[in-house]
Amino acid sequence: MIKRLLIANRGEIAVRIIRSCREMGIETVAVYSTADRNSLHVRLAGRAVCIGPPAPAKSYLVKENLVMAALHTGCEAIHPGAGFLSENAEFARFAEEAGLVFIGPGAEVIELLGDKVRAREAAKRYGLPVTPGTGVVAPDPAGSRAAEEAALSMGFPVIIKAAAGGGGRGMRIVRRPEDLAENLSIARAEAEANFACGDVFIEKYLENPRHVELQILADGQGTTAVLGERDCTVQNNHQKLIEESPSPGITEDMRNTMISGALPVFRELQYRGAGTMEFLVEKDSFYFMEVNPRIQVEHPVSEAVSGVDIVRQQILSCTEGRMETGGGLLPLSGWALECRINALGPGTVTRLEVPGGPGVRFDSYLYQGCAVSPHYDSLAAKIIVHGPDRQATLARMDRALGELRIEGIQTNAGRQRWIVNHPVFTQGVFGVSWYAQALQAAGEAGTPP
Ligand code: ADP
């Protein structure tokens, strides 16, 4: 077992990783920007190293400083968490070249999967269905003409995506052929600015699909486990808000077909650690979207139904080439639901009462008196509940949200409770566009949540 690990992240996910390390007897080193000096992850870690000023580009995204901090403190491994450099192949390579274990599937696999166009091609080779779409659209008039032809043949609307995109950003929906060329150049400029790569491609836009994803764990030695699926269909602007497992929107048959399509891909890649294969589901069909080669925010719902500590298995598989689970679809029980609690602005938490009781888990970096910084993403806490079936789990989440009190900052907790009790959500039949439409309808009816 390794002795010491550096966590190249902050906030709730850094706290989550420290918790598993402590149980495994692994010492932890946190990193922090000057804005995070008093953050919970700094308090909980064995040691902490300041890596720069608040702006991520000068702290959490500076590869050299992170690797130096790890070497300087005698760490043997780096866990990148989610976000920041977690999908950055160069960072993985840099860490590996410095003799550190990168908790992830390795630079080459990250590189392949991080390029959505290459990942789609790989998925197609393995016989997975992908949405109709193009390769990278060449940035010249001939490229635009070819793109228009392709879009007309798949039918409008289409969605332009950044090949290197992520986090629900860098996508543009185009409904009319005459808007395509202009949107392609805007998308290219945005992709260049956000992801340092201007490559874009086009996909058929599905109007209101479900988002369903498989949680995978692999040891890099041939054992690949599936911890069932998560349904992340409640979204606002392509950002996930609520996740659950199992999905209320797929059949046993579809789940099995997805799994038997996904497993060979991970095996062939000699994948190690945690990964998520994402799909869009429309009626009886599903389409491969991408693989995220890292831990995801919504991993706790899979932990709840499988009883597996995903961070622990990630660390074991990447440092020792072993896992404590078998392969294939693991036994799962009950129903789990996660509500993301987002801060709607910065501030200081003046009062915090967290939910508890049977089947309730609260993952957060908040404490009474802590600062919520304007410099980072808005995720402040996650409430995860587990129950015997969907109805009982929804009632449990309603109860948990009712116990939560956060004062000093504004959060979306009230809206989350509104969703959990919404008749469409409780029936379970909806798509990714539903939430925005429901919100608008409530506003028009004069009853905004
Ligand atoms: P990211 O890598 O930024 O997370 P994804 O490719 O995973 O982006 O897509 C995120 C979300 O965008 C999906 O859950 C879905 O809501 C929407 N989306 C992506 N592709 C399509 C598509 N072809 N049709 C409709 N919606 C899509």
Image (cartoon, grey):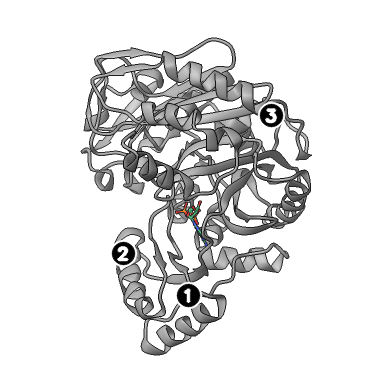
User: Which labelled disc corresponds to residue 136?
Assistant: 1
Q: Position of residue 63 (x, y in %)?
A: 36, 48
Label 1 packing within 10 angstroms: few (<14), some (14-19), many (20+) = some
Of 380 and 101, which appears nearest the observer? 380
Kindly identify the residue that appears in the image at 54 percent across and 17 percent down: 360
Considering the numbered disc 2 on the image, is that residue within a helix, a strand or a loop? helix
Report whether 270 appears left or right of 162: right
- Residues at marks 1 and 2, CA–CA distance in whole angstroms: 15 Å
Tell whether label 1 touches label 3 (CB within 8 Å).
Answer: no
Please provide percent x and percent y for residue 186.
30, 70
Q: Residue at x 53, y 25 (%)?
A: 384
Say above or below: 129 vs 88. below
Distance from disc 2 to disc 3, alpha carbons, whole Å, reads 39 Å
Q: Nearer the viewer, residue 449 or 164?
A: 449
Seen at 76% across and 53% down, the residue is: 257
Above or below — where is 368 with respect to 343? above
The percent coordinates of residue 383 (x first, y second) are: 48, 24
Q: Residue furthest front?
A: 445
Secondary structure state at the residue bearing disc 3: helix
The amino acid at mark 3 is Ser
Residue carrying label 3: 306
Instruction: Name the quarter where the C terminus is drawn.
Output: top left
Residue 420, compared with residue 105, is above or below; it is above
Q: According to the image, label 2 marks what residue?
A: 190
